[in-house]
Amino acid sequence: MGTKRKFKPEEDVVGTFQAYAEYNKILRTWFVAFGVGGPALFLVNDKLAGALVQAEQLRLVVVLFLAGATAQVLGAFMNKVANWYTYQSMVDADTDGGVMHKISEYFVNVFWPDIVLDLFTIGSFGYAAWLLLTVFAKA
């Protein structure tokens, strides 16, 4: 963790974090919707599914979409658990300083897990989209 700095009175720390949290929620919602919506489209569109089956890419494309969505759900779950342990340590002194509290404190104070999951999701969706484009460019 980096060195904590003192904020100037005119800085809106809470507002900045609230904006981050809102954008994080919106991005995660879009990722999950896209990751579930992609495979759903193949289930209702026989022509689309048929072209992917013929190119032997249907299974891989569906797995890529679902893997990206799963990464986002996993990230939301990890954040939920870490924040609960952090909150619990504030209201129950017996849980303060325990192993789960220490792990949770670390997790809620770092940025890299969210970025890794977001980059994985973008990579999964990007590769799935590339496969779709190459299949339909040949059709």
Image (spheres, grey):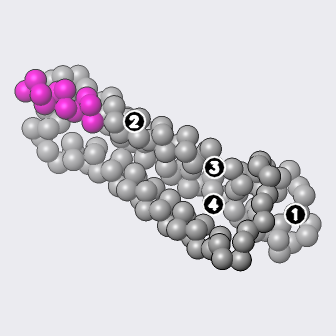
Q: Quadrant of the C terminus?
A: top left
Q: Work out whether mark 3 precedes mark 4 in sequence or the reverse, and give the earlier one.
A: 4
Q: CA distance from mark 2 to mark 4?
A: 24 Å
**Disc number for residue 111:** 3
Q: Work out whether mark 2 precedes mark 1 in sequence or the reverse, and give the earlier one.
A: 1
Mark 4 is surrounded, within 10 Å at the Cα level, by few (under 14), some (14 to 19) or many (20 or more) other residues, namely some
Horizontal and vertical percent position of residue 110 = 69, 50
Is 75 positioned to the left or the right of 34 in the image?
A: right
Q: Amino acid at mark 2?
A: Ser
Mark 2 is surrounded, within 10 Å at the Cα level, by few (under 14), some (14 to 19) or many (20 or more) other residues, namely many
Q: Amino acid at mark 4?
A: Lys
Q: CA distance from mark 3 to mark 1?
A: 24 Å
Foreground disc of the pair 2, 1: 2
Image quarter for residue 4? Answer: bottom right
Where does label 2 land, which residue? Answer: 124
Do the residues bearing badges 3 and 1 touch, measured as CB atoms within 8 Å?
A: no
Foreground disc of the pair 2, 4: 2
Mark 3 is surrounded, within 10 Å at the Cα level, by few (under 14), some (14 to 19) or many (20 or more) other residues, namely few
Q: CA distance from mark 3 to mark 2?
A: 20 Å
Where does label 4 land, which residue? Answer: 80
Is 21 positioned to the left or the right of 81 in the image?
A: left
Do the residues bearing badges 2 and 4 touch, measured as CB atoms within 8 Å?
A: no
Above or below — where is 87 with respect to 60? below
| Residue 51 appearing in the image | no
Image quarter for residue 77? Answer: bottom right
Residue in the picture at 40% in, 51% down: 31
Q: Amino acid at mark 1?
A: Thr
Do the residues bearing badges 2 and 1 touch, measured as CB atoms within 8 Å?
A: no
Q: The magenta stretch spans which residues? A: 129-139
Where does label 1 land, which residue? Answer: 95
Q: Which residue is more in the foreground, 45 or 24? A: 24
